[in-house]
Image (spheres, helix red, strand yellow):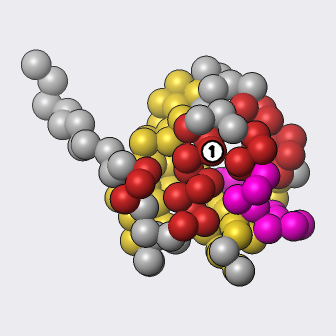
Amino acid sequence: MSGRTTAVPIAVSKLTDPAVRAFVASVNAQDREGFRAALAPGATMSDDGSERDIDEWTEREIFSSNGHMDVETQAADGLRLVVSYRNDTWGEMRTAWRFTVEDGKVRRFETGQA
C-alpha cells in the first residue's frame, strides 16, 4: 500500500463560479461547442507563464488528447482551482488554473504545474 492519499474530486456541479463550472464541464465532456460558449469573445490564455494561441492549445492539450479535469480545490470564489489534469499526451499532473470572468464568460485562463 502506498503512502499517497487520493483526494476525492469536487463534483463539477459544486464549482462556485458558473462560467468556470461550464468550462470544466465542457472539457470533461469533450464538448468543443460548449467550451467555446463558455469563453468570452477574444479570450486569452497562458500555459506555465507563456502566452498560447487558445484554439491551437485547447485542440492539442484538451480535445485531441482526451483532456480531463478532476478538481481538488477551489478558491477565490471559484476562480482558482487546483486540478488533477490528465490527457493522452502527458498523462496525469497536478495543475493550477486561474480564471478571469467577465459578464458570465471566461475572459482569460492561466494554467501551469501546481
| Residue found 53% across the figure and 25% down from its top | 91
Residue bounds of the magenta highlight: 36-50
Viewer-closest of 30 and 61: 30
| 97 to 66, vertically: above or below | below
Looking at the rendered image, the quarter that the N terminus falls into is top left
Task: Say what secondary structure mark 1 lies in.
Answer: helix
The residue to which callout 1 is attached is: 26
Position of 10 with respect to 19 (left or right) is left
Task: Using the rendered image of the protein, determine whether residue 76 is visible from the camera's viewpoint.
Answer: yes
Residue 14: give x, y in percent of width and height: 37, 59
Position of 93 with respect to 42 (left or right) is left
- Residue 95: say if magenta: no
Secondary structure predominantly adopted by residues drawn in magenta: strand
Amino acid at dot 1: Ser
| 68 to 108, vertically: above or below | above
| Residue found 63% across the figure and 26% down from its top | 66
| Residue found 14% across the figure and 31% down from its top | 3
| 62 to 77, vertically: above or below | above
Residue 78: give x, y in percent of width and height: 46, 70
| Residue found 76% across the figure and 56% down from its top | 37
Position of 47 with respect to 28 (left or right) is right
Number of residues whose C-alpha sits closer than 10 Å to that of mark 1, classed few (under 14), some (14–19) or many (20 or more) = some
